[in-house]
Amino acid sequence: MNRVLQGLTTLALSAICTITQAEEIRMQGAGSTFVAPLMQRWTTEYQKAHPDVKIDYQSIGSGGGIKGITEKTLEFGASDAPMSKKEIDKAGGGIINIPVIAGAVVAAYNLPGMSGDLKLDGQTLSDIFQGKVSKWNDAKIAGMNPGTTLPDLAITAVHRTDGSGTTFIFTSYLSTQSTDFKEKVGAAKQVEWTGGQAGKGNEGVTQVVQGTPGAIGYVELAYANQNKLSFVSMKNLEGEFVKASPDSTSLAGAAASKEMKDSLMVPLWNQPGKGVYPICGMVYVLVYQDLGYVKSEAKAKALTDFLSWATQDGQKLASSLDYAPLNEAIQKKVAAMLGTLTWSGKPVMMAK
């Protein structure tokens, strides 16, 4: 009798496990290394409240996120550069760019023995990345840093090897500062750099800067702070030298939102206003407006709910990781955008 009961108990537990496994929802996202630290925090916190939802995010670069969503191998992609109409058309149409956070790109440097705050303007930074300013004690740099002893050391400009939204933000800013840079290098996720060294992702650029005396490279603010890298104060449109921070990035977002009409794809770089940090950008999550490609209605609802949570309650986690939360006006527009998502033609009901 006991053996019979034990057998029934085992069968019952097996059935419960099978049901639990069947109900578990797994989603794969990938792309932007820029947003990776925050995305990892978001997925961890969301899963605490929704243990049946497992979200894996891979930091592979914005180009990888765009490729993955285009090929529908991901539930969502992430990119610091919104997908262009040409890219969306190539994917068959129907993809939307959902802004989820704002962040700053900084010029991080490795100058052993130097103390104080290094200041640069956009023209000089563009000259550095074109190889026109090649020594740290160049007169252009020295003129903006009176009283600072700059070393007679070669500058090594460090850039990305992969298709990168961080590169898009950085080159878009430099293209507003230098006509020569705009014409010879241009603004894109991947460009032809002159000389220097390269690393894959924000992580790779950070490692090269850390290991190369005289290096300067562009990385997302969180990577610079987490790795204790020094970074440049940049001259903004008002003539102020401003350090990147969540507050100075938020000011850029506030200025940009005044230009916003129907589109949420408004550039944050080189915005006017006191205290504004000039090299900022949005991060976008990429999904198809019809979520039929995620296969199940339950997964479509979970994805929509996660994005709703991230762009509302999840914004409270942004500043602690050096990002700037979306302002209220943008949050409302994002909520309306999420409300248009469908699954196989049916509206997706937001999970409560």
Image (tube, rainbow, N blue to C red):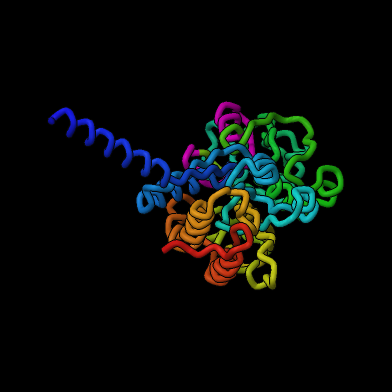
Can you give x and y, in whole percent of width and height, for residue 130 in the image? 78, 39
Q: Residue at x 53, y 32 (%)?
A: 113
Q: Is residue 259 visible?
A: no
Most foreground residue, 303 or 124:
303
Q: In what quadrant of the picture does the N terminus appear?
A: top left
Residue 131, relative to residue 350: is it above or below?
above
Task: Quarter of the image for the C terminus: give it.
Answer: bottom left
Residue in front for this viewpoint, 333 or 237 = 333
Q: Quadrant of residue 2?
A: top left
Magenta-colored stretch includes residue 244: no
Residue 220 magenta-highlighted: yes
x 65%, y 54%: residue: 288
Question: Which residue is at a point 36% across and 53% down the rendered structure image?
Answer: 49
Q: Measured from the top left, where is residue 152 in percent x and y?
A: 66, 30
Q: Which residues are magenta?
A: 205-228
In the rendered image, residue 94, in percent from the top left (x then y), is placed at 71, 57
Nearest to the observer: residue 33 or residue 94: 94
> In the image, what residue occupies the spot 37% across and 43% down?
19
Q: Quadrant of residue 58?
A: top right
Q: Is residue 153 above or below residue 30?
A: above
Q: Is residue 78 above or below residue 343?
A: above
Q: Position of residue 263 (x, y in %)?
A: 69, 67
Number of numbered tags placed on the structure image: 0
